[in-house]
Image: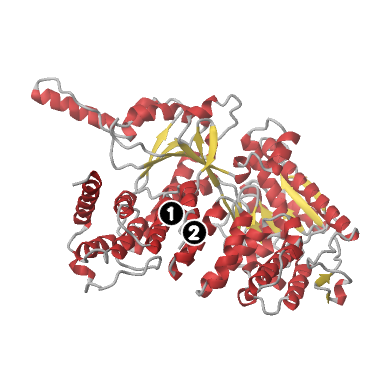
């Protein structure tokens, strides 16, 4: 017998052992099917059942059952077992289609484990022409997801051009059309405006040309609803048979109702003196920065229009607003009216009562308010200004957290919200029992309570889904300034109890035993709500507290532990810790970040977070109605991806990164591509 045959037989025996291990009396599955379920569809069969059928069905017909088992194992998060079946099939003779299907399943498995680079390598090695219809759809969806998560907007759009025309599900057609417009909108203006470079010799080219033209209209006029409406109407005249017409992107629906706030006088209410002066000034600087940026952008837009920049085949608008739009030479031209920048009035909430401020707002005909920042001021002011749009910089003071007026909005950047997102991240990373370490203070109790409440909600939804995966309650341990971290971790991880048990055993036996101190085995993630100083104490003690033969417990941290490390020594010591923060502070190489850092150098990150809040609060004035009216609409701000919930509260999605040898590496949770 050759070595190769011995190896193949060993693989076969290991596969049989795997199958036997997984099979658990499948009598409840129902009548056995003759054919394996179709790959890359949402079949219901479990991995146990599929592997059982693979053992019963003779070679080579059992291959399809084995491939389906890999899909089921990945869905059930049994990645090690999936790898065993993958290894077995890689040493088995497969036809061309089966080989490519296996590679796609491998990419799925890698993607589910957040191994994005490996998944992309696998995807690029697939020959799409030999895939089944279902596999081809899944391949394009997965490839799109990878490009989107890698922020490769042109590649994502090119993949969506292939995916969109072959979708059959109406819900998916709408979702991917929304995504296609979003990705095209991320491209540079020059790319979108060069529609002529996209030839129209075939139906597919005309399809792409139409999308570029539509994205150009959206990109140019998304903050000027009246012009956007006319631009879209003109686009429909140019492309009357375009496939996008049946499922127009959500961003372009209900536009009449989404006319943005366009205030001429804005009041900003901040505590510009007293205890909160510095945070208020950071917000003030962010608002001013956004104001001047927007004014410059409007000025540049006007210069472009007056110099006739838009003479390409891009859809632009020319003529009086009342006259409507003209179509000629495949161009719609409409020179719109550029509004003058609003007047901004900053009011100090520490030198005036809320009644005095409300009176001034009405007497000066203020038509939009940003602030207040402090919740007591917010509670006092909102009932007095129900007729003025307000974007508060804190959560609503009502018991249920909802707005008392339809034109009042809340934009909190709260630690409780961050803790809730941490619970979601740890849940999506498929952990079952998290520990929390938090300061023994009102702040620590509030944030840990928010985490625990969100974890409980996720646990209930998990149980309701009936997938058999049980979550355990989150457990919080509090520390203080005087905490002995060695004892604190010994208690939290129960190594003190293990040491006590060993000591008792030696006393009973009357002799010294060679024993290992064991840490608790139920905990599989730890979320640390602390400043950098406490984290620097906790991290080294963790390696001592955890049993040497136990699996390393993933550590997550809040933005409080993310500070500027000019020597790069502390960041290196924190290698392996994953933490959250606003997007602006995790994207050091963006143009905006570089501009702010050069204009306002060596600022604390806590100050820059408030700058981002101020910048986004001003930018959101023109976005609020779009967020309110258009389902699924979001705005990419400095704090992250912004949405608006049913209670008129702004939700900002934080970004995640992991310390790796002094560098920050993006960390994102798996998102299904199905």
180 with respect to 503 (left or right): right
Task: Name which quarter of the figure residue 513 lies in.
Answer: top left
Question: Which one is nearer the viewer's eye here, 155 or 178?
Answer: 155
Q: Position of residue 234 (x, y in %)?
A: 77, 74
Q: Position of residue 115 (x, y in %)?
A: 45, 47
Q: Which mark is residue 160?
A: none
Q: Which quarter shows the C terminus? A: bottom left
Which element is circle 1 on? Answer: helix
Disc 1 crowd, CA 10 A, few/some/many (<14, 14-19, 20+)? many
Q: Is residue 647 visible?
A: no
Q: Is residue 425 above or below residue 318?
A: above
Do tag 2 and tag 1 residues touch (Cβ < 8 Å)? yes
Q: Which residue is mark 1?
A: 107
Q: Is residue 351 above or below residue 334?
A: above
481 with respect to 629 (left or right): left
Q: Is residue 155 above or below residue 554?
A: below
Q: Position of residue 27 (x, y in %)?
A: 18, 68
Q: Position of residue 75 (x, y in %)?
A: 36, 58
Disc 2 crowd, CA 10 A, few/some/many (<14, 14-19, 20+)? many
Q: Is residue 301 visible?
A: yes
Which element is circle 2 on? Answer: helix
User: Sequence order check: which comes first, mark 2 or mark 1?
Assistant: 1
Gap between marks 2 and 1, in whole Å?
9 Å
Query: What residue appears at the point 67 percent right and 44 percent down from the top-left corner?
Result: 612
Query: What residue appears at the point 9 percent right and 21 percent down from the top-left corner?
Result: 510
Q: Which residue is mark 2?
A: 142
């Amino acid at each position: 017998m050759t070595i190769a045959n011995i190896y193949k037989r060993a693989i076969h025996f290991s596969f049989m052992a795997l199958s036997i291990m997984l099979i658990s009396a499948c009598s409840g599955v129902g009548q056995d099917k003759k054919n394996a379920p179709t790959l890359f569809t949402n079949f219901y069969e479990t991995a146990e059942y599929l592997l059982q059928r693979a053992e019963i069905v003779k070679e080579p017909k059992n291959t399809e059952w084995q491939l389906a088992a890999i899909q089921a194992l990945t869905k059930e998060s049994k990645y090690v077992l999936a790898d065993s079946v993958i290894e077995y099939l890689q040493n088995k003779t497969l036809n061309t289609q089966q080989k490519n299907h296996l590679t796609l399943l491998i990419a799925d498995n890698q993607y589910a484990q957040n191994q994005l680079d490996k998944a992309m390598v696998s995807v690029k090695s697939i020959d799409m022409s030999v895939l089944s219809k279902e596999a081809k759809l899944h391949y394009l969806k997965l490839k799109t997801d990878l490009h989107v998560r890698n922020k490769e907007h042109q590649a994502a759009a090119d993949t969506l051009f292939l995916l969109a025309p072959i979708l059959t599900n109406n819900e998916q057609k709408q979702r991917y059309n929304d995504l296609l417009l979003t990705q095209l909108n991320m491209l540079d203006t020059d790319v979108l405006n060069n529609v002529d470079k996209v030839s129209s010799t075939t139906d597919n080219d005309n399809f792409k040309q139409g999308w570029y033209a539509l994205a150009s209209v959206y990109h140019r006029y998304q903050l000027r609803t009246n012009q956007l409406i006319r631009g879209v109407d003109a686009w429909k005249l140019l492309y009357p048979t375009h496939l996008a017409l049946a499922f127009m992107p959500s961003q372009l629906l209900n536009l009449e109702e989404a006319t943005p706030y366009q205030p001429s006088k804005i009041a900003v209410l901040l505590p510009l003196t007293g205890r909160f002066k510095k945070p208020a000034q950071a917000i003030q600087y962010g608002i001013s920065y956004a104001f001047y940026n927007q004014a410059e952008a409007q000025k540049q837009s006007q210069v472009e229009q007056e110099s006739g920049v838009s003479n390409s085949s891009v859809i632009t608008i020319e003529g009086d607003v009342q006259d409507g739009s003209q179509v000629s030479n495949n161009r719609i031209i409409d020179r719109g009216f550029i509004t003058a920048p609003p007047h901004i009035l900053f009011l100090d909430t520490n030198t005036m009562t809320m009644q005095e401020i409300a009176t001034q707002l009405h007497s000066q005909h203020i038509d939009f308010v940003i602030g207040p920042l402090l919740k007591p001021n917010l509670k006092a002011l909102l009932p007095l200004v129900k007729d003025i749009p307000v974007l508060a910089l804190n959560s609503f003071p009502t018991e249920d957290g909802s707005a008392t007026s339809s034109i009042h909005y809340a934009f909190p950047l709260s630690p409780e919200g961050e803790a809730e997102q941490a619970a979601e991240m740890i849940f999506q990373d498929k952990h079952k029992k998290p520990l929390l370490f938090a300061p023994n203070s009102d702040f620590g109790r509030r944030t840990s309570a928010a985490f625990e409440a969100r974890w409980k909600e996720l646990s209930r939804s998990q149980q309701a889904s009936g997938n058999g995966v049980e979550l355990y309650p989150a457990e919080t341990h509090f520390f203080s300034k005087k905490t002995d971290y060695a004892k604190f971790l010994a208690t939290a991880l129960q190594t003190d109890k293990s040491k006590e048990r060993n000591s008792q055993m030696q006393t009973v036996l009357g002799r010294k035993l060679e024993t290992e101190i064991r840490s608790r085995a139920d905990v599989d993630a730890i979320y640390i709500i602390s400043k950098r100083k406490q984290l620097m104490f906790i991290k080294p003690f963790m390696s001592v507290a955890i049993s040497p033969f136990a699996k390393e417990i993933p550590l997550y941290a809040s933005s409080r532990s993310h500070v500027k490390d000019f020597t790069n020594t502390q960041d290196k010591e924190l290698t392996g810790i994953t933490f959250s923060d606003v997007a602006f502070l995790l994207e050091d190489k963006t143009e905006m970040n570089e501009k702010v850092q050069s204009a306002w150098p060596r600022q604390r990150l806590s100050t820059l977070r408030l700058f981002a809040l101020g910048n986004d609060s001003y930018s959101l004035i023109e976005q609020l109605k779009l967020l309110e009216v258009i389902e699924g609409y979001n705005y990419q701000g400095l704090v992250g991806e912004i949405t608006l919930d049913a209670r008129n509260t702004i939700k900002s999605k934080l970004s995640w990164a992991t310390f790796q040898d002094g560098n920050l590496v993006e960390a994102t949770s798996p998102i299904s591509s199905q």
